[in-house]
Image (cartoon, rainbow, N blue to C red):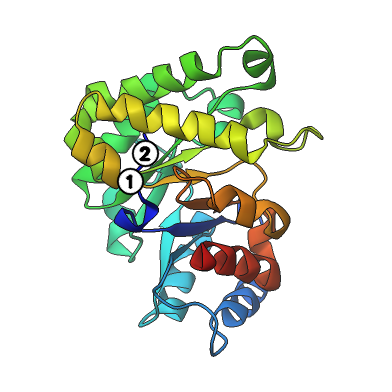
Amino acid sequence: MDTPAKQRRRIVAGNWKMHGSRGRNRALLAGLLAPGTIDGAVQCLVFPPFVYAADAVAQLAGTSIGVGAQDVSAEAQGPFTGEVSASMLADIGCTHVLVGHSERRARHGEDDALVARKFVAALAAGLTPVLCVGEQLAERDAGAAHVVVARQLDAVLGAAGVAGLGRGVMAYEPVWAIGTGRNATPAQAQDVHAFIRARVASHDASIAAGLAILYGGSCKAANAGDMFAMPDVDGGLVGGASLDAGEFLAIWSAAAEV
């Protein structure tokens, strides 16, 4: 489905993963807030570790940069030691949350059903969930990319419905292109993004047309422009490059220029 990008908001999101300190974070955000840099043309989000989220919200108050969390509990409250609920994230000022990130799926055993529950929990608290989907290297080599992404997407469609999915954002993470020495081409990214949009369109074409789908496979300034030029790529979920203000701003600028 070739939908004009101007019908969808472009987004550049920085996932800091387990990096940072109060001092380093303040400096990084100050770099993003320098005059003449980030504005509202392309939505900018940062996803710090839980313990720094409130600090980021405070520093970014009154700016166009939003703050999200890297994970959320599927439970609303209760005896779940170490978990953080969606309502808690909303309470400190987070607006978005990642669900189903490839590292959570692979390293913490999160299956499609749990990811779907987290997506629903985020919606219930008024957060915008960013649903991450994508295939591993063996799955890509076996020609199963679409099958894997469809399974991950369908779990959320089944739990939240297409209207619920439309209240979120999607991010395609080709896991095989993260730290493996293999890079996804813009055409490979476009293929899966178009597949996602077409699958959502089979439920509701209008929601599919407005759904932002980000690219999250080692997104850097060097490849951002070519990736963002693809008709179904609406921005990036940026990992390591988001820890450098200059690099992240270059990626944001690439999205603004497309």
Q: Which residue is drawn at 24% across and 45% down?
A: 167
Q: Nearer the viewer, residue 109 or 83?
A: 109
Q: Which of 178 and 30 is in front in this view?
A: 178
Q: Residue at x 49, y 56 (%)?
A: 50
Q: Which residue lies furthest to the right in this view?
A: 181
Residue 99 quadrant: top left
Residue 154 quadrant: top left
Residue 237 versus residue 45 in the image, above or below: above
**Residue matched to label 1:** 85
**Residue matched to label 2:** 73
- Residue 233 visible in the current orientation: yes
Q: Nearer the viewer, residue 64 or 16?
A: 64
Q: Residue at x 56, y 28 (%)?
A: 108
Q: Residue furthest top?
A: 142
Q: What element carries label 1?
A: loop
- Residue type (three-letter) at the residue carrying disc 1: Ser
Q: Name the spot of residue 41 as percent of width and height, x first.
A: 41, 72
Q: What element carries label 2?
A: loop
Q: Name the spot of residue 18 as percent of width and height, x first.
A: 64, 51
- Residue type (three-letter) at the residue carrying disc 2: Ser
